[in-house]
Amino acid sequence: MAEAEEQETESLEESTDESEEEESEEEPKLKYERLSNGVTEILQKDAAGCMTVHDKFLALGTHYGKVYLLDVQGNITQKFDVSPVKINQISLDESGEHMGVCSEDGKVQVFGLYSGEEFHETFDCPIKIIAVHPHFVRSSCKQFVTGGKKLLLFERSWMSRWKSCVLHEGEGNIRSVKWRGHLIAWANNMGVKIFDVTSKQRITNVPRDDISLRPDMYPCSLCWKDNVTLIIGWGTSVKICSVKERHAGEMRDLPSRYVEIVSQFETEFYISGLAPLCDQLVVLSYVKEVSEKTERECRARPRLDIIQPLPETCEEISSDALTVRGFQENECRDYHLEYSEGESLFYIVSPRDIVVAKERDQDDHIDWLLEKKKYEEALMAAEISQKNIKRHKILDIGLAYIDHLVEKGEYDIAARKCQKILGKNAALWEFEVYKFKEIGQLKAISPYLPRGDPVLKPLIYEMILHEFLESDYEGFATLIREWPGNLYNNSVIVQAVRDHLKKDSQNRTLLKTLAELYTYDKNYGNALEIYLTLRHKDVFQLIHKHNLFSSIKDKIVLLMDFDSEKAVDMLLDNEDKISIKKVVEELEDRPELQHVYLHKLFKRDHHKGQRYHEKQISLYAEYDRPNLLPFLRDSTHCPLEKALEICQQRNFVEETVYLLSRMGNSRSALKMIMEELHDVDKAIEFAKEQDDGELWEDLILYSIDKPPFITGLLNNIGTHVDPILLIHRIKEGMEIPNLRDSLVKILQDYNLQILLREGCKKILVADSLSLLKKMHRTQMKGVLVDDAAKPFSVVAFHCRHMFHKECLPTPSMNSPTQFCNICSAKRRGPGSAILEMN
């Protein structure tokens, strides 16, 4: 039985959504299920005539005059045999402790569910409606209304007697009533009225629009949204009425309240029931359609729509067709819509079926997203509402998402999502890796594998490395660089790489990767050897990082060949680990590299490699002549004779000139400049540096028969040698280039010297005069003598030193002037004259 009910529920949901799925991808607003259990048993033998809903239970009236109290799952909790004929309406007060029932045979009963309080009355006509006061539980509110041909209000008096009064009659049968607060709304054949129980006044009459419809076949649906808002549905028309207070000045003979229709619109189908949903409406509609086979009008599945009311129209939010049992035989009057305000539950009641509609929760939203294969949105929704979802788990949704992506062939996206979805669950990671292996997509997941927290089994990482090693050397090398060496068994991977190198021994990618693996394994010697073979830039970093200087003592030439600049810097920075002597010995067969090393050493410190300065002369001469002369100038340890010999052998004139001058043979050096270089400017510069008159004489003698040299001398020797000496020696008739300009320059230089002398003289005289005046002022100042009153003579010098006269030497005839002993010791200080005081 339960299985059959379950299948029927699934069938209801499928058929409800079938037509909508074809038209729209929008998510439904409601979900549906059949009210089963006891209800199923009841409706197999009987038919539902009416139902009312309380927050705690349901009350169902049947065609056979039974009233059942049900829990929200449809289980029967109580049963009442009220009448042998159809129950027309059931009414409950807000407390759920009192119930009113009316039936087709005119019986009316109002009784307490948990007390002995009871009212019975039988009328001579069918009673279609009944409504008890919402606060019937209070002694002051013992009221209820019934409706047949007239609307009667029953009220218990103070002596516990019931009295009745007619509220309305004469407009046909009363077919619908709703009581809210102090207002009673009812519908008869002509329209809808509202009665104010407090003022005992009828405050409005809302006529029905379509009078062509039979009121018994298309009854009016009434629904109070709140204490002052009444919703009326009749035929295809919906009106929303608001009860308002009338201003005191407007009353006169009018009721204190009035009704304003705030919204009015038409629907597509006939209305069987109404219910509020926040600011929207839930509308149960009876539908007729033309059959394609018979081309006759037939009854279709009822629809449950959610609409947004507007002042003169409405907007459809959702629409669902419901496959209720026996819908082909049902009329508009056979459907009822009841609702529970507290939980937003809507009950679609028909003779053979009761369907419950609920607002979809977050779990339902996720169900719909998963059904539409919108996995990413479902995952996001689950993460946002993880505290509220009950049927779903974020992990399950995520795993389904990964499977979906894999099925679509989006392997990279699936692998990337694993990071977020699998998190730190090592077992799930390993499971997913094997799934990717089965479909041959290990490469896709490799960039996203965890590398620290968690750490997977070494076999997982080795499996992926082997996959890359078989097909993608570059990818394999990338993983080795990026993955920490502790993730896998290093020796296993090393052996695998060596096996591949047997097939391709010169593969640089594999060799470099093998060197990195050796480094992880602390086998630095093998790693260094590979790096040097490959001339890889990381070789120096490897040496520094792991202090491999002892391993490179016999590999210095290889290092220098690879990058002499970096190698020399490294060797010089670590002299304490590899001595200068060792480096020079290793480079003995490569003098060009030896020179690079010694040159850099000399630049850093002129004295550290002094023992190799003699060797360096030949090295500079052979490989770096531009730096030979600076070396000779800066070195104080190279043998000059050896250097001179090498320079003369190679005819290095400039270097030979420097060495000759440094050895004191300036005349030979000058002669070499004149004869070898023929550079008078350099010769003059050399003579200026030596500042030797004999050199100038030699220079003049050598130049006297060479007009270009004479021009050079005339232009440059004016401040060192008297130009007259040169001019007197020039032979008459000799043509000298630019002689006039040279003579003008000599005169200008001479004039400049005169001006400089005169300027210096003026400055000297001015300074002397200033100092003389200062000295005169100083000597003219008085001298304080503290012991002048004592009976002995004191001698005070202008330098302010004082002596007893007896302590000074007696002046002689040759030198009558006395001087201060102290200042005289300082090579005659300022005190020369004396002031004698007796």
Image (spheres, grey):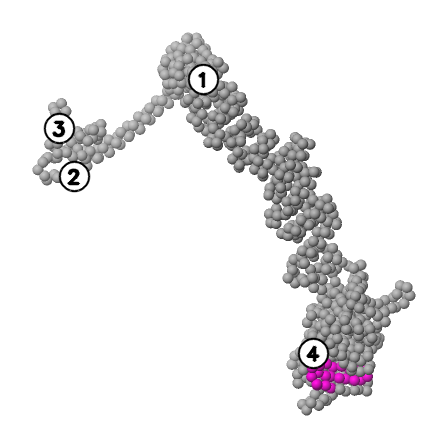
Q: Reading the chain from its start, which is encountered first: label 2 or label 4?
A: 4
Secondary structure of the magenta portion, mostly?
strand
Viewer-nearest of discs 4 and 1: 4
**Apparent side of residue 82 relative to residue 756 in the rendered image (left or right):** right
Measured in 3D between alpha carbons, the distance from the residue under mark 4 to the one under mark 1, in whole angstroms, is: 124 Å
- Neighbour tally class for label 4: few under 14, some 14-19, many 20 plus, Cα within 10 Å: many
- CA distance for labels 3 and 4: 144 Å
Badge 3 crowding class, 10 Å Cα cut-off, few under 14, some 14 to 19, many 20 or more, is few
Q: Are marks 3 and 4 in contact (CB under 8 Å)?
A: no
Is residue 465 in sight in this rendering?
Answer: yes
Side of 96 relative to 124 (left or right): left
Residue wearing tag 3: 809
Query: Which three-letter amino acid code belongs to the residue tagged 2?
Result: Leu
Assess whether residue 99 is covered by the magenta stretch: yes
Mark 4: amino acid: Gly
Asked if 244 appears above or below 785 in the picture, the reply is below
Q: Which mark is residue 87?
A: none
**Residue 111 drawn above or below residue 764:** below
Vertical relation: 675 (above or below) 547: above
Mark toward the start of the polypeptide (3 vs 4): 4
Q: Which residue is mark 4?
A: 96
Q: Amino acid under label 1?
A: Ala
Does the magenta-highlighted stretch encompass residue 408? no
Residue 680 at x, y = what percent? 45, 16
Q: Nearer the viewer, mark 2 or mark 4?
A: 4
Sequence-first disc among 3 and 1: 1
Q: Does the residue at mark 3 contact the one at mark 1 (Cβ under 8 Å)?
A: no
Q: Nearer the viewer, residue 29 or 15?
A: 15
> In the structure shown, which secondary structural element does the residue marked by tag 1 occupy?
helix
Q: What residue sits right under mark 2 in the picture?
A: 784
Point out which mark residue 643 bears: 1
| Disc 2 to disc 4: CB gap under 8 Å | no
